[in-house]
Image (tube, coloured by chain):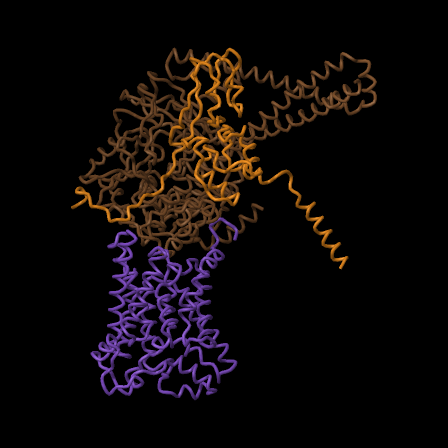
Amino acid sequence: MIGLALALGALLGYAALKFKVEGDPLIARIDAILPQTQCGQCGYPGCKPYATAIAEGRADINQCPPGGDTGVRALAELMGMEYKPLNAENGVEKPKAIAFIDEEICIGCTLCIQACPVDAILGAAKHMHTIIASECTGCELCIAPCPVDCISMEPIAVTPDNWKWKYPVIPIKSLPIKPEFTV
Amino acid sequence: MNALVNLASLLKSAKEIFPFHGGVHPPENKAQSTQLPIAQLSLPEKIVLPLRQHVGNIPKIKVSIGNYVLKGQLLAEAEGAVSAAIHATTSGTISTIEDAIIPHPSGLPDRCITIIPDGKDTWIEKKSQDWRNTDRKNLVSSLRLSGIVGLGGATFPTHIKLRSDGKSGVHTLIINAAECEPYITCDDMLMRERADEIVKGITIAQHLLGAERVLIGIEDNKPEAAAAMQAAVVSTNMRVVVVPTLYPSGDARRLVHLVLGTEIPHDKRSTEVGLQVFNVATVLALYRYFELGEPSISRIVSMTGNVQNPQNFEVLFGTPLPHLVKAAGGAKPKTTHYIMGGPMMGFDLPTENVPITKAANCIIAASPNLFAPPPPAMPCIRCARCADACPVNLQPQELYWFAKSDNFEKANDYKLFDCIECGACSYVCPSNIPLVQYYRYAKSEIIAIDKAHEAADLARERNDFRLARIEREKLERAQKHAERAAAGKEEVAKKALDAQASPTLEGNIHADAGDVKKEALASSKQAAIAAAIERAKAAKAAAAAQGDAPRNVADADETVKKEIAEIDTRRQAVGIETTSEKPAIDEDKHTKIAAAIARAKAAKVAAEAAKQNVTKED
Amino acid sequence: MMLKVLLALVPGIIAYAWAFGGGILVTIALATLTALAAEAAMLKIRKRPIQPFLMDYSAVVTAWLLALAIPPLAPWWLIVVGTLFAIVVAKQLYGGLGYNPFNPAMIGYAVLLISFPVIMTKWPAALQLAQTKLGFVDQLHYIFSGVLPQSVAMDAVTSATPLDYLKTQLTLKHEVASIKQAPIFGALGATNGEYVTFAYLLGGLYLWQQKIITWHLPTAFLGALALISGVFWVIDPAHFTSPLFHLFSGASMLCAFFIITDPVSGPTTPTGKLYFAAGVGIITYLIRVYGGYPDGVAFAVIFMNICVPLIDAHTQPRVFGHEK
C-alpha cells in the first residue's frame, strides 16, 4: 500500500516536473486573442495587462473595442463564459484605421513618439515625424498629445491587394427574369 | 536519389497516361474560335498598362508623364523577389499615370500607365542574346527585365521559376499545352501556327533549367496542334504526350500526374521534386526575348462567345477591350457582360473598359443564351457528386458546410487551401450551389485573419520591446545615480567592492557592453532620423517639382533608399511587407529583444551590487 | 434526380399491386398528398419559398417509401400520421431538405411501429394465398372505414409475414426446414413478395446505371447481410435461414437501393458508405434474429444514421499531394 502510494507520488512528482509550464499559459492565450492594438480603451495600459486582469478575474471580457464582437466571442469561448455585447463605456468597434501625420503641419515635438506604444512613429525633436504604416496598430494614442492636431486616422482603403471575396449571396427565390433576358 | 526517381518514372512511362481522380467534361465550345488564323490586332488609340499584371509586388515606375517611350522600353522594373517588369507595348507619349479600373475580380481601380501611341510603333534597339554561351545566372537576371510571366493565366513571374543561382535540380520539363477550359483556344492556335518557335523556346527553357527530358502535354481534342508539335519535335528528344480531354487536366499538378504519374506533395513546389511546368505561350515569349530581344509586350487572346467573328488575336498588352471586340466583328445583341478567362475559372469583368493584360488568355462575350443565369441554389443534399468530380480528391460538400458557417478552422483541417478553384464541383452540383464562391470567400477570410494575427504578433513584439527599453532606461538611470553616489564615497566602496569583486565586475562588463550597444542603437537611430529628414526634404522637393512623380534616387545611399522604398509602399498601398523579408526582420527583432532583456538583467545586477555597496556604507 | 428515383420505384409498385391488390395505390396516393400538403404548410410556416422545394419531389420519395414499408391495408389515418411525422418532425423541424440527420421515411415507419405494433405487423396475405380475395373497391373501403365486407373475417385476408412467422415458429422449437413448408414461403422469400423484391432490384439497377446511386451502399448492405446470415446458416442450418431468404424477404431490397441510398442522412465518402451499409446489414440481421420486431431495417438505418458524422470524419479519402 505504502509502496503504491510512493510510486504514485513519484509519478505525480515526475509529471509535475516533466509537464511544468512556464508562466501562466492562460494569460498568454488570452493575450493571443487580443488584437495587440495597445490602445488602453479597456482601462488597462496595454493588451497584456488586460489579459492578466481577465485571467485573474478582475476584468470583464467585453472591454476591447478593437477586438470587436469576434474577439469577445473568442474570449467567451476560451474562458467558458457567457457571451456579452461589447461594453459601450470602453468604446465602439470601428473599421481598422491607421494614423497619418500631416507632414506640413508637424512641428516635431516628439510627444506622439513618446505616446506610441509600438514605436511606430519615426522622427526627432524639431523634425517632422512620420508613421511606419505597417507597424501602426491604429490605437489613436498619438492623437491626443499632438499640440497642433496634425494627426488623423485614415481608414485602410480597399485595394486589389487586400480585397476579399464576398460571402455568396444566393437568392433562394426564383429570379425574376429580366426583360432583356427573354428571347 | 535523382537517378532512382528517373528510373521509377522511366518504368512508369511505359504506361503513358496516369489519370487523376474526378474531373468533368463540360461542352468544349472551342471550334468557334479556331475557324480563322491568329490575326494581328491593330494599334489602339491608347494603351493602358496596369502595374498589377502578375502575381507579386507592384513594379516600380521608371518613367514620368510626358516622357516619350519606344516600343519595348522598360516602364516599370521588378520590385522585390516576386515581381515582373512592365514595358511599353508601342512607341508614344505617356499621358497619365493614375488609377483606372483593372481587369480584376474586385472591380477596383489600380495604378496604370497610359501611353498615347504615335502610330510609328518604333522599337527600341533589339538585342538578341547568345544564350547558349552565357552564364545561366546572367540569363536568369536578364529574364527579370523581360517582364515574362506565366501566360497560362497564373501570371507567376517566370524568372522566379528558374533558380536565381542559375542552377536547378530539375530533370524534367513539362510543357503545359493541355488548355482544358472550354472556349479557350489561344494555345491551340499558337501551336498550330508557331510550333517551330515554341520548340525553340522550349530548348531555351530546357537549357535554363538544365532539364534532361521534355514532355509536351496536349489534350486529345487538339489533333492539329498535336500534329504540328509532333512534326516540330522530330529532331529533338522532346516527346508529345496526348492526354485525354478531361477538365482540369491543364492544372499543373494534374498534368504532371497525367504524364508522369508523380503526385507533387501539397507543400512542395514542382521544382523540389525535379520538375518544372511551363505554358506553351510562356516558352514562346522566352524565345522572343532571348533570340529576338523582344520583351513581353503581347499575347494571343481568344476573343469568343457572343461576338460576330470569334477569333484569336495577337494583342498588345494595354489594348482596351472594346478595340478587341470591334476587331472580332463587334458584340452580338444581348451581350450582357464579358468574362475574362474561361467559363470555369474566369471572372466577370466589371466593365468593358478594361485593358488586356498578361493574364487575359480569353475574353468571352456573355449572353443569356450562352450563360443562362444560374437557377436558384437549393440546399446541399450531400449527394457527394462534387467529391466524385474533385480532381484534388477533397470533400467539397464538407468544405461548403464549413465555409458557409464560417467554421474556418475546420475548413483548414479539410484542406481548403488545396482547392484549386477549378469549379468542377460547382459544375456538377445538382443543387446549383456556387461552391467555389464559398471557398474563395473562406480562403480570403482566412488569409485576412492570418494577416491580422501576424500584425498583432508584430505589435506585441514591438510593445514588449518598448516596455523592455523603458525599463532598461529606468534601471540605467538608477544605476548612474548609484554610481555617482558610490564615486562620492570611494574609499568605503572600495572595501565593499573587494568583498564582492567578481559579480560586480561581471555586471559592469555587461553594463558596458550594454552601453556600447546603446550607443550603436542611438547612432542608428540618428541615421534613421537623418534619413527621415532627407526623405522629407526629397519628398517636398519632388512634390514641388512634379507632384507624385518619382524622385531622383541615384545619389541616395542604401538606408535612404530603403526608407524611400518604405514610404513608397505605404503610399501606393497600405503597407504589407513582402513575406520573404519578414522572417529576417523578426529574427533581428528577436535578437534585439533578447539583447535588451540581457542588458536589463545585467544592469539590474550592477544596480543591485551598487545598492548593496551603498547600504554597506551606511 | 428524385424523379428518377420515383421512376425506379414504379416496377416495384406494379409488382406489389399485383401481389397484394390495388390497395397499395391508394396508400401511395394518400401518402403523397399528405406529404405535399405537410411540406407546403411547413415551408409556409418557416417562411421558405414553397414552389422550388415542392418541385424537387423529395417529399414524394419519402411518402412512397413509407407507403411501401407499411402494410398495404393499413387504415388511412395510420398513413397520414406516419407521413406527417416523417415530413413535419423528421424533416422540416430539423431544417428541411438537406438538414435532416435521419431518414424521414424510416423515422415515420419506426414511430408507427412503436405506437401501433398490432396494425403494423398485420400484413394482408398474398392474393393467391388468401382464403377470400378482396377486390380493389373492398380494399379502398377497408382502408378508409376499417370495415370489411360482410362475411369476410379479418383472419381470412391477413397472414403473418414469413419473417414474422419464422420467428414465432422458431420460438415454438420448430426447425427451419419444416417451417418453410408453410405456403407463405416462396422459392426464395415470401410467396409473391419475392417478385416485389425482384422488381425493387430491377429499379435499383436502373438507378445505378443512371449514376444516381453508386455501387457501394447496396453491395455493402446486401453483402454484409448475406455474409452474416451465411455464417449463422452454415453453423446451424436448422435454426437459421439461408442468406438468400434474408436477401429476398422483408424490406432488404427496398432498403439496399432506396432507403440507405438517401444521400442526406447517409455518409458521403466511398469508404464511409461501405461501413455504413455493412452496419445496417448486420444490425438488420441481428434484429431479425434476436430482436423484438420481425424486420429490423428501420431501426438499423436510424442507428447507423447517428453514426454518420463519425463515419465521415474517420473515412476522409487521401487528398491529392498529401500523405494519408
* Residue C91 visible within the image: yes
The correct choice, above or below, for B430 with respect to B574 in the image is below
Q: Position of residue C139 (x, y in %)?
A: 24, 78
Chain that appears brown = B
Image check: B291 left or right of A11? left
Q: Position of residue A131 (x, y in %)?
A: 48, 21
The residue at the point 43 percent across, 81 percent down is: C167
Q: How many marks?
A: 0
The colour of chain C is purple
Chain that appears orange = A
Q: Position of residue C319 (x, y in %)?
A: 47, 51
Q: Nearer the viewer, residue B451 or B233?
A: B451
For the N terminus of chain C, the quadrant is: bottom left
The correct choice, above or below, for B102 with respect to B396 in the image is above
The residue at the point 66 percent across, 43 percent down is: A20
* Residue B148 visible within the image: no
Image check: B527 left or right of B255? right
The correct choice, above or below, for B404 with respect to C288 in the image is above
Question: Splitting the image into 4 quarters, where does residue B32 fall?
Answer: top left
